[in-house]
Amino acid sequence: DQQVKQNSPSLSVQEGRISILNCDYTNSMFDYFLWYKKYPAEGPTFLISISSIKDKNEDGRFTVFLNKSAKHLSLHIVPSQPGDSAVYFCAASVGSGGSNYKLTFGKGTLLTVNP
Amino acid sequence: GAVVSQHPSWVICKSGTSVKIECRSLDFQATTMFWYRQFPKQSLMLMATSNEGSKATYEQGVEKDKFLINHASLTLSTLTVTSAHPEDSSFYICSATSRAGGSDTQYFGPGTRLTVL
């Protein structure tokens, strides 16, 4: 059972436009959410996170929105750049620390930013 | 930033042999390391949680006798795939937690591509 779902396997946007990547989750115990970026043959790189006590977190061009009632979060990238082209993974956990800090990942969305 | 390395980056082995993968935190001490596996077009699946100086905790469905994990120091964890078979071919990624700013962040290694012939 996929507890974290990224229903769009791929997304293509034009440079300078907004990229919106979506993620849904089913486990209501999740209270910490993260986005990772991954290039081929490399490990994921942490991008941004959000705690369930917030509904928005912003870091430069990256903003994550959380809608707890809908069990939905999204990552906005504005403006999109060709270097943003990668696979983006949504991840969730119960709690945000300690030795039991386990991440559950979605399948990822391949973002392609066209020049 | 925190750097996690893995060795080897790729390995090809014959069926029935054992393969050891190392995961090192280069510039920080990690009391906890995690091992993930990723099949093509699938998500990263947590295999086990490795705590320094104690036995690893395996996720449901992961055979602990097949995937041996040793976390001998605060900067090194190893995963040994014993008696590897073609179905074990996958991308294995480790992560290590670093506590900075009061919260834990998982930093991932670059992964190891295992191909079992």
Image (cartoon, coloured by chain):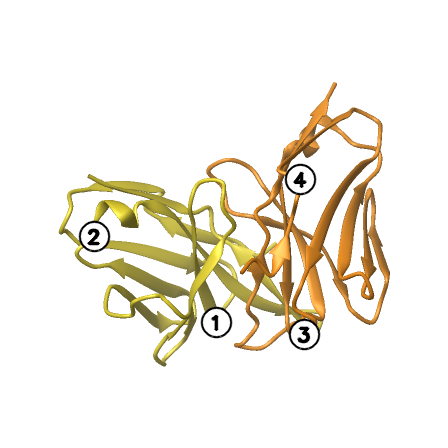
Q: Are marks 3 and 1 in contact (CB under 8 Å)?
A: no
Residue marked by disc 1: B32
Q: Colour of chain B?
A: yellow
| Residue assigned mark 4 | A8
Return the x and y of residue B69 as percentages of the image width and height: 31, 67
Q: Nearer the viewer, mark 1 or mark 2?
A: 2
The residue sitting at 57% across, 72% down in the picture is A101
Residue B77 image position (x, y, % from top left): 36, 65
Using residue B57 as the reference point, say whether residue A81 is left or right of it: right
Observer-nearest of B47 and B76:
B47
Q: Are marks 3 and 4 on the same chain?
A: yes
- Sooner in the amino-acid sequence: mark 3 or mark 4: 4
Q: Which residue is mark 2?
A: B84
Amino acid type, mark 1:
Thr
Q: Look at mark 3 in the image and give the residue it sits on.
A: A29
Where is the N terminus of chain B found, in terms of image quarters? bottom right
Q: Residue at 86% across / 58% down in the picture? A: A56
Name which residue type carries label 2: Ala
The alpha-carbon separation of the residues under discs 3 and 1 comes to 22 Å
